[in-house]
Image (cartoon, rainbow, N blue to C red):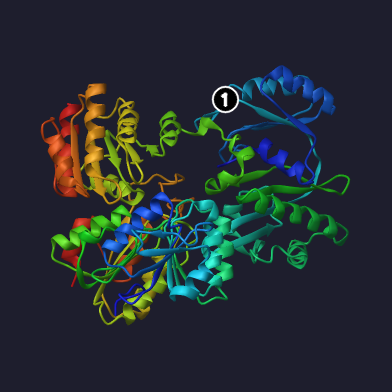
Amino acid sequence: MSILAHASTKLLVQGITGNEGLFHTQQMYQYKTNIVAGVSPGKGGDWVLDGKVPVFDSVKFAVEATGANASVIFVPAKYCADTIYEAADAGIALVVCITEGVPVQDMMRVKRFLAEKKTRVIGPNCPGILTPGESKIGIIPGNITFPGNVGVISKSGTLTYEVLYALKQAERGVSTCVGIGGDPIKGTGFVELLEMFEADAKTDQIVLIGEIGGNEEEAAAEYISRYMTKPVVAFIAGVTAPPGKRMGHAGAIIEGNEGTAQEKIKTLEASGIRVARHPEEIPSLLA
Amino acid sequence: MKLHEYQSKQIFARYGIPIPKGRIAGTSSEVKQIAEELGGRVVVKSQVLVGGRGKAGGIRLAKTPEEAQDLATILLSMDIKGLPVRKVLVDEAVSIAKEFYVGIVNDRVHQMPVLITSGAGGMDIEEVAQKNPEKILRTYVDPLLGLRDFQVRDAAISMDLARPLWKNFIEIIQDLWKVYVECDATLAEINPLVINAENHLVALDAKVIIDDNSLFRHSDLSDLRDMDVEEPGEIEARKFGVTFIKLDGNIGCMVNGAGLAMTTMDILQLSGGEAANFLDIGGGATAEKVAASLKIILSDLKVKSILVNIFGGITRCDEVAKGILVAATEMKIKIPMVVRLIGTNQEEGRRLLEKANFSAAETLIQAAELAVNLAKEGQS
């Protein structure tokens, strides 16, 4: 089955007429993702990709007309919270938010709002989801991986590509790759995805890519040791990151002595999880 | 973005939070004048963006305007934890009957705001949290509902605040909540909040940190950024949409993506070297951005080799290669460079660089080892 993104997923693109939105719609389309609609307020009635994808003024209209059940967001940060509310209000089950730079308090309100909805958000500030050979929701390059039995969860973008590429070089394919994003408050965390991969028949083992900041890796370690039967290999970026500095990602910061890579690696290893020293070592640690 | 105490207090004043009378000064004669206006006894407070100013001797009590002037002369020539004191805040001295801690902060684990209150005011709150966690109350706030009065009242009760002060306390904390929400703060803190001799509550200190992601809707606040806390390279990089952080090693790094940039630093260490910087060139790197990044890296004279690690997705390897060539010719770069290009248009990128004298690498480990060896050669 793989997780979250499938061949049957009917995707709509929020912000489809912007530069980023249009470019990546094309890329996703070429990957044969089932893109059924786009939304761009004020441009309803237009078509993009040579008349292949219809544009609507609102998510509600797009859902009514096409039955879209997932959305990917490419709007600027200042509109991002509103687009998520709109997608959730229209009953979209999966919202993948690529946008970087969303204010933290916006995301806290979004999280609280979603607690009473059936919508799952991935991101923001993430590369999205790729189920090789089936569906690409976001910006992960399709040609650096192929279908297989390794599930990948990551807080990062290009580092994830690096890992997918290393897996490919070692002839390891992927069931689904999910980038959860590098922000301190995000729609979906490691633990929820570990749970999904554990239940997924196509996934036999999991690669988890974390980084400095917060304590999600520690929470993941505890979850894995308690509940998971499938093996997990981890990699944590930022062993050499200085404290108090935000390392590019809004969430990647060592605060006081909290959130160091060393502490995360120690906790993961103490829970019996193999931790790679660098991305190219990951394939050799897989079962 | 951290704000200075005086900037935070200006915000507090706008929201009606009581603060001591005081003014900001850049010279000791101004300090004397302000002290005279305030009636003599003042506190002279260094304005630097680090914690522990008091312990470092950066906050001093003066009994007379003359003493204030002398102290200001000392403070204004001081460095605190490496940061120069350029301004001091001169506040009227307040006699303190009791001190409290109050702060509103983003709680990353619970993913909501938390109001932290404690009767142990004036101390390092993280130290209190470690040694006497029972002295701290954490009240989680529903971000859609906002902070409710009953929650603040419970906090007042738990820190033994006298009943006649509850109403005043609730007003102040609700104003602090407004500061937190309306300024998109990640922290809005009063430490200490004191009861003065007249039995009123006053915010003696103020600390506000603004969420950098929110600055697009706070143009008035973005002007408050203090450039002293940042390296010149960091400021320059921001103009190009590049994230740069200076480090201590001698191998310059140019990478696309924050996670991969950190990983590149880590692998250098694993290979026996040390990165001179963190540099995330961002998505869709143009030749212009590449050239600007190399310039920033090379402004650090300690740099003995450069490792370029690009994983092309949106970023195209040929575009990056062009940028490298332009920069190398224009700047006559003599520092040896290792270039690893993988992904979108990698063949074209590599072909462009073949003619020039760069070391190419296939894997991350190879690239790191090459860069470490070149740096060692350059060092000897």
Which residue is at 63% across, 45% downward? B208
Q: Is residue B347 left or right of residue B65?
A: left
Q: Quadrant of the N terminus of chain A?
A: bottom left
Q: Quadrant of residue B205?
A: top right
Q: Quadrant of residue A49?
A: bottom left
Does residue B156 appear in this view? yes
Q: Is residue A274 left or right of residue B281?
A: left
Q: Which residue is mark 1?
A: B78
Q: Is residue B46 left or right of residue A119?
A: right
Q: Quadrant of the C terminus of chain A?
A: bottom left
Q: Quadrant of residue B154?
A: bottom right
Which of these two is toward me, B218 or B129? Answer: B218
Which residue is at 31% across, 62% downward? A28
Q: Position of residue A240 (x, y in %)?
A: 33, 47
Q: Position of residue A70 (x, y in %)?
A: 42, 71
Which of these two is toward me, B40 or B295? Answer: B295
Query: How many numbered marks does the figure carry?
Result: 1
Which of these two is toward me, B194 or B239? Answer: B239
**Image: B196 above or below B84:** below
**Image: A63 above or below B102:** below
Q: Chain of mark 1?
A: B
Q: Residues within 10 Å of mark 1 (few under 14, many from 20)?
A: some
At mark 1, the secondary structure is loop
Q: Position of residue A50 (x, y in %)?
A: 33, 58
Outermost residue toward the left? B355
Which of these two is toward me, A62 or B206? Answer: A62
Q: Position of residue A185 (x, y in %)?
A: 50, 60
Which residue is at 54% across, 64% downward? B111
Q: Amino acid at mark 1?
A: Met
Does residue A92 appear in this view? no
Outermost residue toward the top? B29
